[in-house]
């Protein structure tokens, strides 16, 4: 195997590993026992950024989705 092929292979493995870690963080960020699809939330727009990287329209919507922690503001603002 030449050095170029080996280098590409190593880069692909590293990239796949980093994606797996991001997905693992998203699943540990959601508490499936706390998901409540029947919860009633206001339509008031006060965005929060969930620990899973998704923006929710307000804290109630994040909690309804089972998000365990979030910060004020949309995710695009937080970055």
Image (cartoon, rainbow, N blue to C red):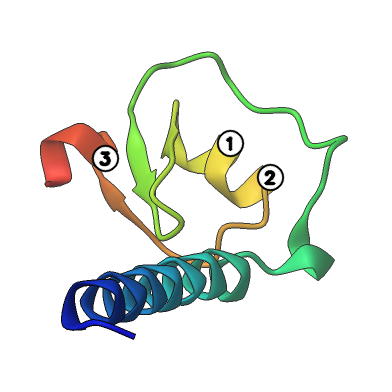
Question: Looking at the image, is mark 1 or mark 3 earlier in the sequence?
Answer: 1
Q: Quadrant of residue 66?
A: bottom right
Cα gap from disc 3 to disc 2, whole angstroms:
18 Å
**Which one is in front, 79 or 47?**
79
For label 2, the crowd category at 10 Å Cα-Cα, with few meaning under 14, some 14 to 19 and many 20 or more, is some
x%, y% of residue 8? 27, 69
Q: Quadrant of residue 41?
A: top right
Q: Quadrant of residue 68?
A: bottom right
> Which residue corresponds to mark 3?
75
> Which residue corresponds to mark 1?
61
Q: Is residue 18 above or below residue 53?
A: below
Residue 16 is at least partly visible in this image: yes
x%, y% of residue 57? 44, 26
State yes or no: discs 1 and 2 in contact (Cβ < 8 Å): yes
Cα gap from disc 1 to disc 3, whole angstroms:
15 Å
Which residue, as the protein is rendered here, is positioned at the far front? 1
């Amino acid at each position: 195997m030449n050095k170029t092929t080996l280098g590409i292979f190593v880069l692909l493995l590293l990239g796949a590993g980093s994606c797996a870690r991001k997905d693992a963080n998203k699943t540990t960020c959601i508490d499936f026992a706390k998901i409540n699809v029947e919860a009633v939330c206001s339509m008031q727009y006060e965005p929060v950024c969930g620990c899973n990287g998704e923006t929710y329209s307000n804290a109630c919507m994040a909690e309804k989705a089972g998000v365990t922690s979030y910060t004020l503001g949309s995710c695009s603002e937080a970055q």
